[in-house]
Image: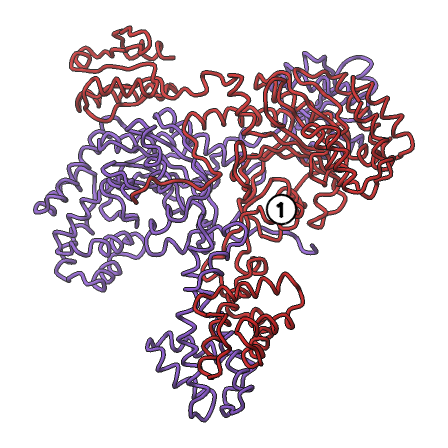
Chain colours: A red, B purple
Amino acid sequence: MAQRPSIPKGTRDFNPEQVAKRNYIFNTIKQSFETFGFQPIETPSFENSETLMGKYGDEGDRLIFKILNSGDFYKSLVMDDSVTIYGLERFNTCLQKALNGNYKTIKESLEVELRKGYENDSYYSKVLNFILGIKEINFGNVLPVEAEEKDKIKSRILFRYARLILFDSKTHIKKISEKALRYDLTVPFARYVVQHQNEIEFPFKRYQIQPVWRADRPQKGRFREFYQCDADVVGSKSLWQEVEFVQLYDDVFDKLGLDGVTIKINNRKILSGIAEVIGARDKLIDFTVALDKLDKIGEEKVKEEMLAKGISEEGISKLQPLFNLSGSFENQIESLKAILSSSQEGKQGIEELEFISNAITNLELQTATLQLDVTLARGLNYYTGAIFEVSAPEGVDMGSIGGGGRYDDLTGIFGLKDVSGIGISFGLDRIYLVLKELNLFPETVTKNIEVLFTNFGSKEALYSLKAIKTLRKQNIAAELYPDNAKMKKQMNYANKRNIPFVVLVGEKELNSKVYTLKNMKSGEQFQLSLDELISHLK
Amino acid sequence: MAQRPSIPKGTRDFNPEQVAKRNYIFNTIKQSFETFGFQPIETPSFENSETLMGKYGDEGDRLIFKILNSGDFYKSLVMDDSVTIYGLERFNTCLQKALNGNYKTIKESLEVELRKGYENDSYYSKVLNFILGIKEINFGNVLPVEAEEKDKIKSRILFRYARLILFDSKTHIKKISEKALRYDLTVPFARYVVQHQNEIEFPFKRYQIQPVWRADRPQKGRFREFYQCDADVVGSKSLWQEVEFVQLYDDVFDKLGLDGVTIKINNRKILSGIAEVIGARDKLIDFTVALDKLDKIGEEKVKEEMLAKGISEEGISKLQPLFNLSGSFENQIESLKAILSSSQEGKQGIEELEFISNAITNLELQTATLQLDVTLARGLNYYTGAIFEVSAPEGVDMGSIGGGGRYDDLTGIFGLKDVSGIGISFGLDRIYLVLKELNLFPETVTKNIEVLFTNFGSKEALYSLKAIKTLRKQNIAAELYPDNAKMKKQMNYANKRNIPFVVLVGEKELNSKVYTLKNMKSGEQFQLSLDELISHLK
């Protein structure tokens, strides 16, 4: 391989410093998860395709990475007559008529007969243009008369069309691939709950921190492989769980030293209520999708989009109080009560938000702020109650760093009805960038070894290894430079690796049974016994 | 979905207890890795196909999981004329001759003309049998005369053959799949080193604990997704590293409480030397593959296999002293010196083993035993020096629980020559089974939360959550039962989750500002203030 090797786009290698910093975030999140009573589970990296397909909306299936079946993955396609018979027989008939008909040129014969055979305009064009791409045939030529000439043209055209019809990725996917990589952790979790329902105590509180894979177009901050950090509870409708999740977000960011995050909260019932009140009940998704973009595109463009989706001008004008909604949680709630006075569902949503807000006020958050945001929808349409989104502190240019919500029927897709759930997620990669920007990674995070022992010969090396063995037993990370190299090279290595101490061992140290410890920062050197060395390094 | 959902064969879900136990092993291994100076890296789950293909021997590629290209994965195949032209034109010629020839039956016509067209016996049979499988054609019939009838038969046969030739998985793989899941951690590590060589300080000590995937046939103890725990050093030929790795194995198993493991060691040069001495130098692989099976199939069968592979009887008889090799490391070394006296390479191997053995004797292992095993080869043919394998303690029926060795030129496959490496691996799943069998998981490993607070109403719940907040700040894992359910149900939940303490909070407790703590094992109850509660639980 002459060229430098590389990794697929959208993926990353992590060096030791990056691993250490990522683990710092993971471990902080885990600590909070565990004090809040969540227990970890792990699911396989690939699930059966039918578990994942169709669960992520129209665009979802396209973005899932499929795993090719092992061995001869074409086996079932080769043996499947239905794959060819219908499609090619029909085409063959058109082709026969074209070649045996009364036409001036080959091209004309195809145009006419294919037109009769394929009514669908775009498919007809697709087939015709594909056939006309055959370089070996001059389609402007007069239709040949001799059987052998006709047969040659016919087979070339048939072979080309065979490729078009046989290589149909959309229909073949199911035959050549039966497994796919996880797209998120929520669907696998629902599958896990239903599969293991007899071994689970409800309410079931689980956390899951594992990678997921999406075939998105990679860009800044968007990767094809990334971790999700989720905590969910299934089996209870209690609003105390919404309260706890707000506390959980607060606890994690407090531990990370990330002050000033905003936890935005909304409720699907409020969005439904608003849609109801403006007469757009049947356009709930279009409505919420447009509304959710308020922060990004502004009020005017949001209204334009709603108009374009068929929401009435009258209805949109009723939204004005919402666009003007501001002030404290309580003030906004009062305004909402007025706006949604005629919607039962809307009022239910308000009640739920009030409960959560009052509890949080009583319990007090440590560092985050809870804020009502009635435009928050977060795209996914399986939320049925509370909806959360966490914003980075002011001044930090980052999208959301966490989100979640209540979903009343997720396990229903796998056959277990009536199990309400609620969960939140932490955006690991974005949190990493925020901590980096605000310089919040503790210095100790990237420390590797404490002390390097020099190597100036076999006897010295053995002597050093005995000391290293004792140091390691005291949990002091230590190692021996493996080769008997020049002093300069060994010191250079210690510096490049940011090792704070070096122990020099030469004949003198061997004979006196001491160790010369050098502080790499200050340059100071000490002659120490083994015990003194241990105390010094601890 | 009427049926219970499931996961692909060879994969596993892990419940909280299993995750906790696996993490106990991972964390113990990591601790040792870090005190020994290894730092973690992480590589992507999927690599470019060319990085992995061809690196694992003849059978390897078959067992690698391939990822289907995103979008229209057939795109390049549809447009590629070469995929059809040659193969089908040739077949078409045979078919024309068959249908227009002077044959009695359709079958006879095909047999004769295809035979002329395809000299390769097995391919001819494959094609013929495949064609004869067309149900719609009665091949015993007389060859038709009418053009339309001939054409119908011809197109059916062409369409069928098109499938056979177009659905060629071996050649298509490269066009529809460009990425594949990691098969191990060693090749990705070599790729990482070459790709990032300018950012790495050599010698580079890295550990990597990540899952890998293999399309093996699943059986007991063999999974399609499993973790590898590897530690490697690249950039030095120093034998002190071999010594350190023996110490590292010893340290991990000592920490796990797994006493009495045997670390078997051999050296590729010794195997080469033996092969040289018995005149089987050119059959080194066959020789070592057979020899490595000694433990499994016994001396007689090993000799039979060697004979079958073309190793002379005379040579095999020279092996007798090896089969009889026993006793201490030193004794075996002495015997080997005699046997390999005429082999330079063999003597080099002996020197290396002596160095390691002497150092280990001086340094003393804590719990493991180092043993020489000259039959150890471990299948993989990239070891060039030391070869390790770790056996479970006696009495435990398990295969190896770890292995590794020295490889002088791994990064060479990616363009970076002359970088010597050595590494070891821990068999996580087998170690798990051994610890389980010997009851060596500490009880604390699977503990989840310390205390559950009951929920008998809103006021009580809020009061409890305030206390829970304080407990959590003290790192005491606590939670509130989310619903206001009957006492029995809440107590039952606590028992099913093995929660050691429950705090009862009713009106009485609210008014007196106390908490009634119940010890779930003993049944004792105490009325405590918040501070007393904290002390009691810590």
- Residue A60 visible here: yes
Q: Nearer the viewer, residue B473 or A275?
A: A275
Q: Nearer the viewer, residue B15 or A428?
A: A428
- Which of the 4 image quarters holds residue B210? top left
- Which of the 4 image quarters holds residue A469? top left
Relative horizontal placement of residue B80, taking residue A128 as reference (left or right)? left
Label 1 resides on the chain identified as A
Q: Which residue is mark 1?
A: A60
Tell me the quarter of the image containing the N terminus of chain A.
top left
Tell me the quarter of the image containing the C terminus of chain A.
top left
Local packing at callout 1 (Cα closer than 10 Å; few below 14, some 14-19, many 20+) is: some
Q: How many marks?
A: 1
- Residue B367 visible here: no
- Which of the 4 image quarters holds residue B509? top right
**Residue lying at 43% horizontally and 92% vertically, measured from the top left:** B103
Task: Please tell me whether residue A10 is drawn above or below residue B286 in the rendered image.
Answer: above
Identify which amino acid the numbered label 1 is placed on.
Gly
Which secondary structure lies at badge 1?
A: loop
**Could you tell me residue B113's position as x and y percent?**
39, 84
Relative horizontal placement of residue A241, taking residue B366 as reference (left or right)? right
> Residue most toward the right?
A342
Q: Nearer the viewer, residue A116 or A369?
A: A116
**Could you tell me residue B486's position as x and y percent?**
81, 32
